[in-house]
Amino acid sequence: MWKGLKNALLLSVMPMAMATGAFANEPALTGATKDAAAKIFFERCAGCHGVLRKGATGKNLEPANTTKLGQNRLEKIIANGTEGGMVNFDDILTKDEIKMMATYIQMPPDSPPEWGMTAMKGSWKVVVPVDQRPTKKMNNVNLDNVFSVTLRDSGEVALIDGDTKKIWNIVKTGYAVHISRISYSGRYVYVIGRDGKLDLIDLWMEKPQVVATIKTGLDARSVETSKFKGYEDKYAIAGSYWPPQYVIMDGLTLEPLKIVSTRSNTIEGEYHPEPRVASIVASQIKPEFVVNVKETGLIKLVDYTDIKNLKETTIESAKFLHDGGWDSSKRYFLVAANASNKVAVVDTKEGKLAALVDTKAKPHPGRGANFVHPKFGPVWATSHLGADVITLIGTDPEKHPESAWKVVQELQNHGSGSLFVKTHPASHNLWADAPLMPDREAAESVTVYDINNLDKGPEVINVAKMAGLPESKAIKRTVHAEYNETGDEVWFSLWAGKTEPSAIVILDDKTRKMKAVIKDPKLITPTGKFNVKNTQHDIY
Ligand code: DHE
């Protein structure tokens, strides 16, 4: 496919230089070149700007805006990035590709095809039927301490035994695989790729393998599984960016049962054709999924007790919802409306918005971090893509009403460009990364605070240096802290280039010193890590 793209580019040098549409000066690409540009846009740009280019985390790129900037300015922006957070593509795309993309985004956007029940059923495969799966655990691995690690650019997950620190198995999954979630029994891992491919892995097998697979959409980011008592492992749900919809599936076979479109009007009342499904979490106190719709700013509480007569409670919050997590009581869900610089708080017991909290620029919590603040009681933390702070929000309206749903403190992070924070109930440490900092030292480091002594200030640790990897051109971005089952080790990924050595560094949480490093040529671009027990029980 990429070879085809290169050929298409060579053939298209002439037409591109002479590009004319129906009117002189109207930018145009045709045939294979246009297809190649559409493919790059879908894979590299749509995540932030939207397939229809209406903008979300990234700017609106409809022709009315892009033609004003013009070919030269657009080429510069794509090559060098912007201070507003757009990354530089000059080390990802060739000069010809950058030229082509600058032209492509001045043309009207194409709408990709839909993906309904017939297409979904056609892609669905039960590899090992339920009655042929093991009836008991067939291995000696401590499943509570297994980590499912995203190998982003190889489209795989590495299942790592947290006790021995050995790779147990590497399982082929979807394109640019994104996240893993664990069934409430702790037996199954659900892995979603950006191409919408969902794989179900059975941890009871001697070597865990995919037992069912389905393509849930053409572009996806989220998956979750039912957690309410009596519904453990019963349903899975996947959210799509394209088509904008979610699908509820049988939890053990992935048979698609119900597809629900999220196209609707925004909180301001305007129709939006592409409201993408961002994070999804499952309530433990009600038979509900919480589905966050990015572009409309609507949060759906989806009651899964009667799939045929599905009930949705629609909560108005703020636009461009992205990622979020539960507070420690598991009653409140806090989600970043990142391009609005807000965190929305949903009271899932009452089925209402509890608060909209203003924060510094672009909060990006992952699932956030919960701990008891010595002064303000229970708090939930997020770091930011657009500010070098870690924001603490009070989460206990009963015993600490004066702090609830307020920013009670902002801690200094060592950079903006942060994606994830993490702690554990057994730990006194709060960790924050900053992998999207352009500066190598900052991107390779993490900040850590003692939560019992926040006034002491942070320690900044260069995790990448500890690993002893060979020098590389690519920054070894230190990303995504995850605790082990007992909460005494914290794991970080070193996310380097696809052809450069990466690693996972494990720190002793008490001493903050390196305890182990996992290096293996098969660990290609490791990013997210999902410990079975912590993910299963929403411990963060
Ligand atoms: Fe993610 C979570 C979307 C880029 C690593 N990411 C999420 C979630 C969403 C999302 C909606 C919440 C899922 C949930 O909880 O159900 N991510 C997007 C994007 O749209 C974006 C910005 C651009 C894109 O084109 O995909 C994007 N994400 C990335 C990356 O480049 C990261 C850093 C590396 C990678 O592996 O792709 C990345 N995203 C993650 C991780 C989580 C995540 C590790 C889960 C965090 C957790 O602890 O739960």
Image: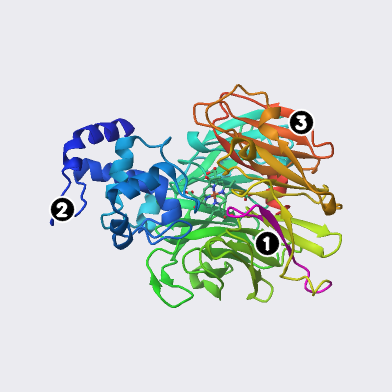
**Amino acid identity at mark 3:** Met
- Residue behind label 3 places its C-beta within 8 angstroms of ligand 1: no
Question: Between marks 1 and 2, how big is the CA–CA gap?
Answer: 60 Å
Q: Nearer the viewer, residue 127 or 445?
A: 445
Q: Quadrant of residue 135?
A: top right
Residue 30 image position (x, y, % from top left): 19, 46
Report whether 153 appears left or right of 159. left
State the SS at label 2: loop
What segment carries the magenta color?
Answer: 383-399
* Residue depth check, mark 3 versus mark 1: number of the one nearer the observer: 3
Which residue matches tag 3?
514
Neighbor class of circle 2 (other Cα within 10 Å; few <14, some 14-19, many 20+) is few
Neighbor class of circle 3 (other Cα within 10 Å; few <14, some 14-19, many 20+) is some
Which residue matches tag 2?
21
* Disc nearer the start of the sequence (3/2): 2
Q: Is residue 511 above or below residue 111?
A: above
State the SS at label 1: loop
* Disc nearer the start of the sequence (3/1): 1
Which residue matches tag 1?
230
Q: Nearer the viewer, residue 295 or 383?
A: 383
The residue at 66%/56% (across/down) is 232
The residue at 82%/53% (across/down) is 454
Labelled disc at residue 168: none
**Amino acid identity at mark 1:** Gly
**Amino acid identity at mark 2:** Gly
